[in-house]
Amino acid sequence: MVDAFWIWHFVNAFEDGGDIVVDAIRHDDFRVFASPVDLNAKVSGEPALWRFRLSPKQRGFSGEPLRPFPCEFPSVHPRHAGAEHRTVWLQTYTKADGGEGAGVGRFDIQTRQTQYWYNPEGHLGSEPVFVPEHGNAPEGWLLQLLQDPEAERSYLAVLDSERLDAGPMAKVWFNQAIPMTFHGVFVPEANR
C-alpha cells in the first residue's frame, strides 16, 4: 500500500536491473494546483525532489526524498533522458528551509549538494532551461527568464551550468515585461 501523493513534473526515469527508477517532484497532495508553494510559511504539500523505485516482478514500490527542500521545474541533460543521470537543474523557492531562496539550483544526486544562484530581490523567475554547450558536452548554459517588476522589464539570465554561484555570464534585456512562462525547451538547429 502506498500513501497518496501528487506528481506534477517528472525529472527522468531509467532501468536498473529489473527495477524502474523514477525521479520526480513529489507533492503531499493536490493543493499545488492552487499554488505551488506558500511563499510565507513552510506548509505541507511543498514540492521536493524524490527518487522512486518500482519493482514490477516483486510488485514493489518505494521512495525516498533526495532533496527535501521546496523546488520545481526539474530538468536533466538531454543526453541522459531515459538513462541514469547525476545532475538535476531546478527552480528553488522559499528561504524557510534554512537559507535557500528563490532562484535556480544544480543538484548533484551522488553528493546530495545543491549549488545556487538566487534571483535578485523582487525578481520573478520562470522555469530554467538547460542548453548543452555543443552536442553531448556535459557542460552548458542554464537559461532563466526573469521579470523585474520595478523596471517593468524582463531579461534572460545566462548562467554557466557548472558554476551557477558565479552569477549570470550575461543578461539579455527586453524592452517590456514578458509574462511568466514555463516548459521551455532548447532544440539544436540540426534537430529542427
Image (tube, rainbow, N blue to C red):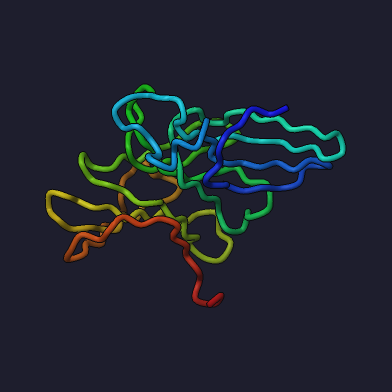
Q: Residue furthest left?
A: 151
Q: Position of residue 5 (x, y in %)?
A: 58, 33
Viewer-proximal residue among 40 and 134: 40
Could you tell me which residue is drawn at 44 percent across and 36 percent down? 31
Image quadrant where residue 120 sits? top left
Which quadrant: the N terminus? top right
Image quadrant where residue 70 sits? top left
Q: Position of residue 105 (x, y in %)?
A: 42, 40
Q: Position of residue 93 (x, y in %)?
A: 36, 36
Relative vertical location of residue 177 with respect to residue 18 in this rendering, above or below: below
Q: Residue furthest right?
A: 57
Viewer-proximal residue among 137 and 8: 8
Could you tell me which residue is drawn at 40 percent across and 51 percent down? 127
Q: Is residue 5 left or right of residue 165?
A: right
Q: Position of residue 50 (x, y in %)?
A: 58, 34
Q: Residue furthest top?
A: 98
Could you tell me which residue is drawn at 14 percent across and 56 percent down? 152
Q: Is residue 91 left or right of residue 149?
A: right
Q: Is residue 191 left or right of residue 124?
A: right
Q: Is residue 21 left or right of residue 45?
A: right
Numbered label tally: 0
Could you tell me which residue is drawn at 56 percent across and 41 percent down? 7
